[in-house]
Image: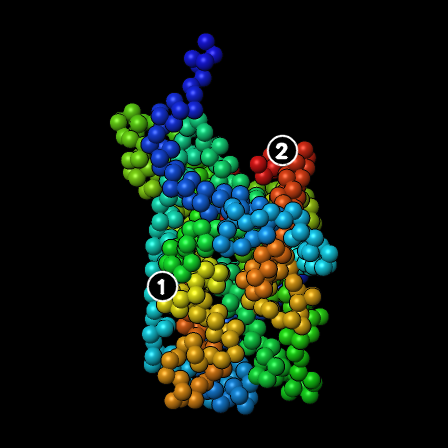
Amino acid sequence: MKSLKKPGFFHELAKNKVLYLMFLPVAVYYILFAYVPMLGIVVAFKDFNYRDGILFSPWNGVDNFRYFFVSGKALQVTTNTIMYNVVFLAIYTIFSIMVAIMISELASKIFKKVSQSFMFLPYFISWVVVSAFMYNFFNYDYGLVNNFLRALGNEPINIYSEPSYWYILLPVLYLWKWVGFGSVLYLSAISGIDQECYEAATIDGANMFQKIFKITLPLLKPTVVILLLLGVGRILRGEFDMFYNLIGNNGLLIDNTDIIDTLVFRSLLGTQDFGMASAAGFYQSVLCFLIIMIVNTIVRKVDSESALF
Amino acid sequence: MKKSTDQVVFLAISYIVTSLIAIFTLFPFVVLIVNSFASEHSIIFYGYSLFPKEFSVDAYDLIFRSPDTILRSYGVTMLITTLGTATSLFFSSMAAYVMYRKDLKYRNGLAFFIYFTTLFNGGLASYYITLSSTYHLKNTLWVLLFVPMFSAMNILILRNFIRGSIPDSLCESAKIDGAGDFSIFIRIIIPLSKPALASIGLFTALGYWNDWWTPMMFVERQRLFPLQYVLYTIISSVNVSSSVVQNASSVTMPQESLKLAMTVVSTGPILLAYPFVQKYFVKGITLGSVKG
């Protein structure tokens, strides 16, 4: 009886063959460009050479990892990646919410539109262009900032030889690029809040600040939590585009600005150190996966509606 | 209605802070454009400034005097952007439609098959080796097309949009009228998902336009360099002359202003299109933030 009721796998495929065929192009893409490379992660345990390929290169146990950890690189890039990402996530969230709340209260439609357009603009350009901006501002000989400093009689600064500047610059640039995007995101969440809440509060005599802290922020909390958790899930994935374009392979800055992604890239294409590249990549992928699983499990326990999957 | 003190204070702060941030974000663009019209001489002697002492279009003149490299890279970028976006949109929305169909038993399995790729990957080393030595995609147009093609998030956003805006009954009645699964997609789903397709399409197009990573990883042949990567090589290299302008030896190179002019030339189309397409991006972000 049961077997009659439950059509099998092939029966389902045959019944909806057109639909499954329509899914095929995307499926083939993900198999070729995501799942096959996923299996290739075993290269982290191999002494890779091009002649034998991933499949036939000899195994070398955990040799690749030994060097990655013993050299102290693992600790350094992990610390840098997490540190920058935590700072980025924190300021991005705070500023995006702040700007979104401010814009939502502004009365002038034109002002709203124009300021939002300006803020959103950096989202559309690549980090390549941002690095051109940096050059305009901080070039030692001609840069705008250095000109200004010289005009005031101060010494010009050379950001490409002094790591400490980047602790400020990178977060500021990150904010510059993403605050527009973030404020659009939170603005759409704010516009979903029922206006009656505010009207009722006004009747009860609440002032602007009370409304923000007692209505807007609490109602934004679920959105914020979700986005923060997504951010935490990606805490070990660095902004490669940003770091590589702005800093590149600058040896003077590397200890303070090397993240996992730049290390992997440099080992792979620069020094051709496949062992290091694959070990660091494996470490990043597996840890990321574990973190996101843990995060999701916690979210599902607390509030199953908000779980990612 | 008269505004109370707290409102006035709050609005004043809002206007000031918002203006400051807006100026702060726009400022670099202004500096870039203004200085791309400054003469090399004034940059060398006075540095970059908001009000250059001498104006000149030498840098632009130089770029367009021997425009082969620039035009070719424009061509490559245009080709991969249009072809890639069209292909991506068509197959993404088709997959989204398949996952939307309630009568499909494995629809959630398919969705997880796609979603899982955002949770776990094989790392850059494996990806690079697989594409370059197993698939032999190095130095081909294909690699520029394929790498940025699909985004799991975009496909799932499209599915959520279709699910939220097209009622099942519409599909069912079309089926009763004898429409096939594919023609339902072409005749009903595509026309009704136009707003979402416009947004997702523009996000995809922007991704292609700004992609410098794929050529950096997989392309060494200069003929295949897209615009963004040409720009990257110019900005990151000390010596500009070799990469953009062939007959460089005969003229004195306005190196500094050339960098700026190249940046303007490669970003120009985005800046020009921006006022018209901005609203679709805003809509796209809103679509994405609605969890399905």
Going 58% across and 68% down the picture, which residue do you hit?
A248
Q: Quadrant of residue B221?
A: bottom left
The chain that hosts pointer 1 is B
- Residue A86 in view: no
Kind of residue indicated by mark 2: Ser
- The answer to whether A308 is drawn above or below residue B71 in the figure is above
Q: Are marks 1 and 2 in contact (CB under 8 Å)?
A: no
**Which of the colour schemes (rainbow, by chain, secondary structure, one colour) is used?**
rainbow
The residue tagged 2 is: A304
Secondary element at tag 2: helix
Going 57% across and 61% down the picture, which residue do you hit?
A272
The residue tagged 1 is: B76
Question: Where is residue A44 drawn, in percent x and y?
Answer: 60, 49
Closest to the camera, between mark 1 and mark 2, is 1
Give the residue at the far left of this rendering. Answer: B178
Observer-nearest of B97 and B16: B97
Observer-nearest of B81 and A72: A72
Q: Quadrant of residue B81?
A: bottom left
Kind of residue indicated by mark 1: Val
Question: Where is residue A181 drawn, in percent x and y?
Answer: 54, 56
Observer-nearest of A106 and B236: B236
Secondary element at tag 1: helix
The Cα atoms of the two marked residues, 1 and 2, are separated by 47 Å
Mark 2 nearby-residue class (10 Å; few <14, some 14–19, many ≥20): few
